[in-house]
Image: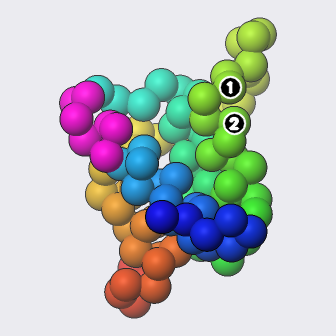
Amino acid sequence: MASFGNPRSELAAMLADLLETYSTQHRTCSAWESHCLGMAIAAVRFGDCECALNCLADFHRPPSAAPTFRLPRALTLDDLRQAIVRVTNNAPEAD
C-alpha cells in the first residue's frame, strides 16, 4: 500500500494498479492515455516522481477538446513494468 506523502510509493502503487487493470482488459491505450503514460515514464527516468504523479492523475481526465500533441509510440505492458522497476529500485535501469 502506498504511504501518504511518499511520492515514490504513491507512484509505484499507481503504476501497479494501471498494469493490473490493463493486463486484464487486453486492450491498447488511447492516444491520451499513451501521452500521459509516456510523460510519466519520462519523468520517472529523470527521477521526478511528483511530475509523474501529475501525469498519471491526468490519465483518467482527458481534455474535452481534441488535444493537439504528436501521437506517441504505442506503449506496451513491458514499458509499464520497466517504469515500476525503476520507481521501486527492484533492478538496475534499462537503456
Q: Quick one: SS at disc 1? A: loop
| Real-space CA distance between mark 1 and mark 2, rounded to the nearest whole angstrom | 5 Å
Depth order, front residue of 3/38:
3
| Location of residue 2 with respect to 87 vertically, above or below | above
Q: Are marks 1 and 2 in contact (CB under 8 Å)?
A: yes
Residue 80 drawn in magenta = no
The residue that mark 2 highlights is 58
Label 1 neighbourhood size at 10 Å, few (<14), some (14-19), many (20+)? Answer: few
| Location of residue 58 with respect to 5 vertically, above or below | above
Depth order, front residue of 84/29:
84
Which kind of residue does numbered mark 2 sit on?
A: Asp
Q: Is the magenta stretch mostly helix, strand or loop?
A: helix
* Residue 37 image offset from top left, x and y in percent: 55, 46
Task: Tell me the quarter of the picture where residue 8 sits.
Answer: bottom right
* Residue 17 image offset from top left, x and y in percent: 42, 48
Does residue 70 appear left or right of residue 24 in this picture?
right
The residue that mark 1 highlights is 61
Residues rendered magenta in the picture: 20-26
- Residue at 42% x, 31% y is 29
* Residue 28 image offset from top left, x and y in percent: 34, 30
- Residue at 31% x, 46% y is 20
Which kind of residue does numbered mark 1 sit on?
A: Arg
Residue 71 in view, yes or no: no
Q: Quick one: SS at disc 2? A: helix
